Amino acid sequence: MPEYTVLTLAAIPAVAAMELLWLRTGLFRRGQYWLAIAIVFFFQVWVDGWLTKLSDPIVLYNPAHHSGVRFPWDIPVEDFGFGWVMVTLTILVWEHLGRRTSTPEAS
């Protein structure tokens, strides 16, 4: 079973639903967020491409745990979903905790 693929595909809608249905920080409507994601993905391609290149890999993936689709170069496509989930969830938690601590408490 391709656990990495399944967990990544489950985590993407879970994080999106967390934002859209529960936290509602407005993160997905901010240009700053999408610019940050573009910057993360730009550097992810270079670093992940270097780490996972099949000609001389530093990071090895068990073929049984992912789909086997690699793009661009030799990057497992699941890495992009995982990266989006990791960065987005971190920002969402940061935003949520920031709102909670900056809201005056009712007396």
Image: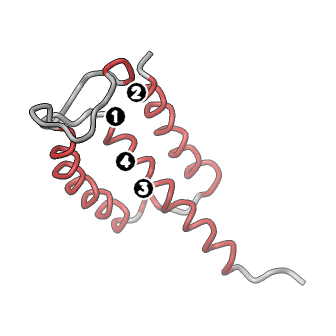
**Residue carrying label 2:** 5
Tell me the colour scheme of the image: secondary structure
Residue depicted at x 59% and y 48%: 18
Circles 2 and 1: CB distance less than 8 Å? yes
Percent position of residue 75, x then y: 21, 37
Percent position of residue 37, x then y: 32, 57
Percent position of residue 20, x then y: 56, 50
**Residue carrying label 1:** 78
> Furthest-left residue in view?
55
Report the amino acid beneath label 3. Answer: Val
Say which mark, if any, is on residue 83.
4
Say if 60 sits above or below 94 in the image.
Answer: above
Residue 106 located left or right of residue 23: right
**Residue carrying label 3:** 87
Report the amino acid beneath label 4. Answer: Gly
Circles 2 and 4: CB distance less than 8 Å? no
